[in-house]
Amino acid sequence: MNAAVATSVFGAFMVLTVVLGLLAVRGRGRGGGITEWSVGGRSLGAVFIWVLMAGESYTSFSYLGGAGWGYDFGAPVLYVIAYMSCGYAVGYVVGPMLWSYARRHGLVGITDLIAHRYGKPWLGALTALLATVFLLPYIQLQITGMGVVVSTISYGTISLNWAYFIGFAVTTAFVVVSGLRGSAWVSVLKDLLVIGTLAFLVVYVPLHYFDGYGDFLHRVVRERSAWLTLPGHGHSSMGTAWFVTTSLMNAVTVVIFPTTVAGYLGARSADTLRRNAVFLPAYNVLLFVPMLLGLAATFVVPGLADSDSDLALFRLVVDALPAWAVGVVGVAAALSSIVPMAVFMLVIGTMWGRSVLSLVPRLSGERRQRAAARAVVVVAGGVALVLTYTAPDTLVRLSLISYEGMAQLLPMVLLGLVWRRFTLVAGLGGLAAGVALVCVLVFGGHDPVWGVNAGIVGLAANLLVALSLTYAGAGAAGAAADTRPDGEVLADDGVRPGGAEAA
């Protein structure tokens, strides 16, 4: 009976999700091309951009991983709040600059930006391949997260394998039809449910299992003191140096993450992005809730294995709430997987449609690119799903280098777009050095290295090589080819360094 009630609530909201996606593109999909599908026709206002970008960052990690890290380690999980808040500050400057450059030249993604800056279409295709490797793990992780949610709220009547497929099917159908605009509309529903369920749980759990926050926090200080300081409980490598370097690296990397750039380029104006950057940190307050609930779970359901710690929050929910409430909380968690997964899949489709498949003459043109991008969405989601079933560790291992790998694109994107002298040779040399060093350190079991995040070490090597090649004059003879014929870079594109558009 409990399973039937909870899954009925869940199913009804999934139908509502698809309906919202269809309503979002009503009257737009038939005549629109890849620009309408991938960046919402560059017409999303402040509210939709706010919920969309909050939706990208508030993933299933927020419900499952945040509570799991709070359960396992404690204080180290606060790096998420640190880097996201700092990243919004960086985005206040970078977002409007990227938006202005992309709007002027009709660009719809990070691969377009790189290909346009260096005048090399093949470079956009190379970036798309590299970014796909780093984004696929996020799709797999969201499929896994949604599968765990569906299986748990069904009280085990839906197997994990079927739950994985349900997550893939709903998200793929949703994103193919609705694109970025649909993701923005569904983000509104997701935010209402997330805020409502977390506000309820943060009050209900301490009252239900303890005598309120006083008793709960006193017990945490008395019995879980190791969870309250770095390096946290049972993981000595996540100390102060790791916390600082990881927060710094992620804060600057998140602004060029392909999904973030998609959010930037969907905005109606640069001022929308600036206002968005001011208010988005307030959303981070919600991240404290799963962390606190993870700590509460150490008392209520102690002894969870490492592989089960991500279930800490839902063990509390299933134990304490009636079936209909379990279903509502499950919907909020599922939408926290669907929205970011949809954007990840959409971005991969856009990158391939614009930068890889567009190299084929038959696939040129906005409508053909949109059709190709939609096909890539299905393929990318299918690959992630198959690997979830057959070789889950493959993408999990790749996820170890996702942020560290994407960080290596920073010099090529940001330095390249604001510094005329920066050449293609320097960018590629630094990129190769940074990615190679990150792979060696991470897969060799040396992350962190001397307590420092391996991605920062790789980025330092990347910058050293790139700057050395630039100042040594490597590729100087081809510099004119490396920069667009008119010598145009972002700083010369009518945008002041602070991000404001020149009059």
Image (spheres, grey):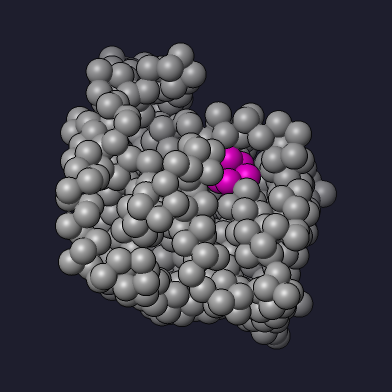
- Residue 280: in sight, yes or no? no
Pick the residue in front: 205 or 279: 205
Residue 25 in magenta?
no
- Residue shown at 60% from the left, 79% from the top: 324
- Residue shown at 75% from the left, 60% from the top: 157
Q: Quadrant of the C terminus?
A: bottom left
**In the image, farthest residue toward the right:** 362
Q: Where residue 268 sits: x, y (%)? A: 43, 75
Q: Where residue 144 sits: x, y (%)? A: 62, 48
Indicate left or right for 240 with 58 as reference.
Answer: left
Indicate left or right for 308 with 370 as reference.
Answer: left
Q: How many marks?
A: 0
Placement of 291 over or under 448, stated as above or below: below
Q: Where residue 5 sits: x, y (%)? A: 69, 78
Q: Quadrant of the N terminus?
A: bottom right
Indicate left or right for 309 with 468 as reference.
Answer: right
Indicate left or right for 155 with 397 as reference.
Answer: right
Q: Where residue 500 sits: x, y (%)? A: 25, 65
Pick the residue in front: 424 or 408: 408
- Residue shown at 29% from the left, 45% from the top: 74
- Kindly report the secondary structure that dominates the magenta region of the rendered protein: helix
Q: Which residues are magenta?
A: 135-142
- Residue 99: in sight, yes or no? yes
Residue 139 in magenta?
yes
- Residue shown at 55% from the left, 29% from the top: 397
